[in-house]
Amino acid sequence: MEEENTPNNEMEVDRETGHDGFISSGDELEPEQPADPVESVQLVIVDPQALDVDFNHGRIAKIENLERLTQVENLCLRQNLITKIEGLSTLTTLVDLDLYDNQITKVENLDALVNLTSLDLSFNRFGKIENLNTLVNLKKLFLIHNKITKIENIDHLTQLEMLELGSNRIRTIENISTLINLTSLFIGKNKINKLKGLETLVNLRTLSMQTNRIVKLEGLDTLVNLEELYLADNGIEKLEGLDKNTKLNTLDLANNRISQIENLDHLEELQEFWFNDNKVSAWKEIESLVPLKKLETVYLERNPIYYDAGDKLKADPSYRRKIKLTLPWIKQIDATMAQSMVG
């Protein structure tokens, strides 16, 4: 069930579709839906001693008949027709529960699952985070694409390392100051307009806030261990506020409103700089990247410098060559490997 949406430096990155097989928060794909209504089937246990039980895409409408599972640790009920969380009270050995893509309208009846370390309730229909009181051993919590309007009732989950809240209706980062063990936080595709409430999350290595309403880079000073920062598709106008984030290796500011590349000299570990679809119009701005000798990939397409001076609808034929001349060590420019470029 584990999903990771951050780039792996040893793997080829596709900026358009995601990384390592996982679509990043803010870019989630809708689950496949059946073309026609289907009849539900009853859940039947074949091996009571099984440790891993997978009923993925099984047309199951009700969680039942699981009492015989005395040793199960991983239960997958992805892509079914389940409307209610029930029938799990005897499965106290569970460490991983996957209910991704069902029709659940309320988080409930999980109290007995005190050994859970991973819970996936993504792509369901509930609007409130609740009834997780006993799940204090959770390390990973996935709540993508529901109808959640507020971050609440998780401040006691202090063992959490990964929290995924992408594609909801959240307006404010709040009630997570106690989650100091978080290393990955994803809140993309929400309605958040301010970077705040992150001050205590000093162990964060990955922060994804893509597709929100953020206009200013701020509130990151205490995140000194941050390695990957995703802020694409916001309204940010100035590159700033990263003075303390010297461990960054990936910075995604694509599709914002930034006209100057500045305040990056100190990011000596930076390898990936995604800055396409901004407002950079002067080639001298690229020179700001010269101090970053570990930089391997830059995305700058669809900035004003990308287009031909005589035809604003056509790419400048010397665009890539100019970048390569300024940053001769670069390995990838946009989606093209720099070594293979001609001219």
Image (spheres, helix red, strand yellow):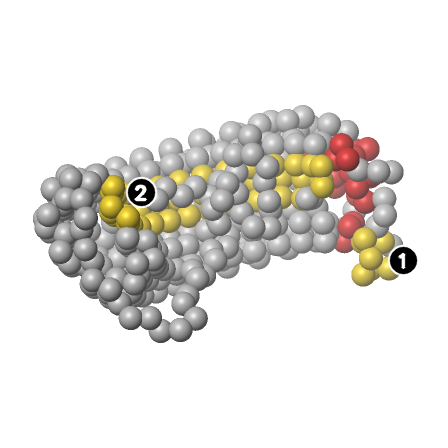
The label on residue 81 is none
Q: Amino acid at mark 2?
A: Lys
Q: Does residue 83 appear anywhere in the picture?
A: yes
Q: Nearer the viewer, residue 285 or 118?
A: 118
Q: Residue at point 19% right, 48% down?
A: 46
User: Residue 52: image x %, image y %?
Assistant: 25, 41
Identify the mark nearer the N-term, 1 or 2.
2
Q: Amino acid at mark 1?
A: Gly
Q: Nearer the viewer, residue 44 or 331?
A: 44
Q: Residue at point 57% right, 27% down?
A: 269
Q: Quick one: SS at disc 2?
A: strand
Q: Quick one: SS at disc 1?
A: loop
| Residue wearing tag 1 | 310
Q: Nearer the viewer, residue 294 or 262?
A: 294
Is 125 situated above or below 75? below
| Residue wearing tag 2 | 140
How many numbered marks does the figure carry? 2
Q: Nearer the viewer, residue 91 or 45?
A: 45
User: Residue 333: image x %, image y %?
Assistant: 71, 40
Q: CA distance from mark 1 to mark 2?
A: 52 Å
Q: Does residue 114 appear anywhere in the picture?
A: no
